[in-house]
């Protein structure tokens, strides 16, 4: 079972997921531009930004809690550029040290539930780190709305090289990759809402259905029909809920 709600931290979502201990199909996590702070059966992890579908591996985990940060919002709080975590799942201790991570784990254990404890940690760290880069926030808003990378660069007053460099730190990859990821997410949201593939492709900003199908294979590693079937056969959850082991 998967559940989520808006976080008290602006732009973030907190979520929980309980797995069947008897096992079941493993569904890939598609790129969404986000990063997550995870509690997995007591283990604290960070899921970096993905450039391709991620399939959970390793020892089975039965209970997850997570806080999913909007694109560009996590690096300041975590204290590490996003590109250093690209396509990676790392122990929180590798970023914040063993002693600090143990203290956090103890506070989470004392909280009403793991997701409440994680949210409290994120709120404290975010307050100390200050607001994310506002220019990168504007880039995200424009790309989410279907704008071009060139248009976003002009809007924030950055040259192509400056935008790319700051995007690596904020998102883990360049603005063109972020635009592709966000476009795919727009299309998939429409597909899951019942919009035909061809209409979803055009509405999301793809040239045609074939273009969307290629993007799905390149970024997601599966076909549109396979993704739709997988999503319909599982407890509803967004592609960004980064279960891992």
Image (tube, grey):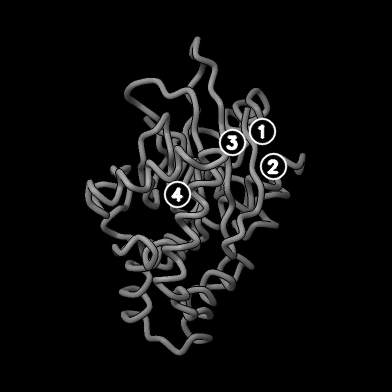
Quarter of the C terminus within the rendering: top left
Contact between labelled residues 3 and 2, with CB atoms less than 8 Å apart: yes
Q: Which residue is mark 4?
A: 36
Q: Which residue is mark 3?
A: 224
Q: Tell me which numbered mark, 4 or 1, is placed earlier along the sequence.
A: 4
- Camera-nearest label, 3 or 1: 1
Q: Tell me which numbered mark, 2 or 1, is placed earlier along the sequence.
A: 2
Quarter of the N terminus within the rendering: top right
Residue 36 in the image, given as x and y percentages of width and height: 45, 49
Label 4 and label 2: CA atoms lie apart by 24 Å
Q: Tell me which numbered mark, 2 or 3, is placed earlier along the sequence.
A: 2
Residue 22 in the image, given as x and y percentages of width and height: 50, 9
The secondary element bearing badge 1 is classed as loop
The secondary element bearing badge 2 is classed as helix
Contact between labelled residues 2 and 4, with CB atoms less than 8 Å apart: no
Q: Tell me which numbered mark, 3 or 1, is placed earlier along the sequence.
A: 3
Q: Is residue 4 left or right of residue 101?
A: right
Q: Which mark is residue 236?
A: 1
- Camera-nearest label, 4 or 3: 4
Q: Residue sitting at 43 percent across and 48 percent down?
A: 37
Q: Which mark is residue 191?
A: 2
Q: Which residue extends farthest top?
A: 22
């Amino acid at each position: 079972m998967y559940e989520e709600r808006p976080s008290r931290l602006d732009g973030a979502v907190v979520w929980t997921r309980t797995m069947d201990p008897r096992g079941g199909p493993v569904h890939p996590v598609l790129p969404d531009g986000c990063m997550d702070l995870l509690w997995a059966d007591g283990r604290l992890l960070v899921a970096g930004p993905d450039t391709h579908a991620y399939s959970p591996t390793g020892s089975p985990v039965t209970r997850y809690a997570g806080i999913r940060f909007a694109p560009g919002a996590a690096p300041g709080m975590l204290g590490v550029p996003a590109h250093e975590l690209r396509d990676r799942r790392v122990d929180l201790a590798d970023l914040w040290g063993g002693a600090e991570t143990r203290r956090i784990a103890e506070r989470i254990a004392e909280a009403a539930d793991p997701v409440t404890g994680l949210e409290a940690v994120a709120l404290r760290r975010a307050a100390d780190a200050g607001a994310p880069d506002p220019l990168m926030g504007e880039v995200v808003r424009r790309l989410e709305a279907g704008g071009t990378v060139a248009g976003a660069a002009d809007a924030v007053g950055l040259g192509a090289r400056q935008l790319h460099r700051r995007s690596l730190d904020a998102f883990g990859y360049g603005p063109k990759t972020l635009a592709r990821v966000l476009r795919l997410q727009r299309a998939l949201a429409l597909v899951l809402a019942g919009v035909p593939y061809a209409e979803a492709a055009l509405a999301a900003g793809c040239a045609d259905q074939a273009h969307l199908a290629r993007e799905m294979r390149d970024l997601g590693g599966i076909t549109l029909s396979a993704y739709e079937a997988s999503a319909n056969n599982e407890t509803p959850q967004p592609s960004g809920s980064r279960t891992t082991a």
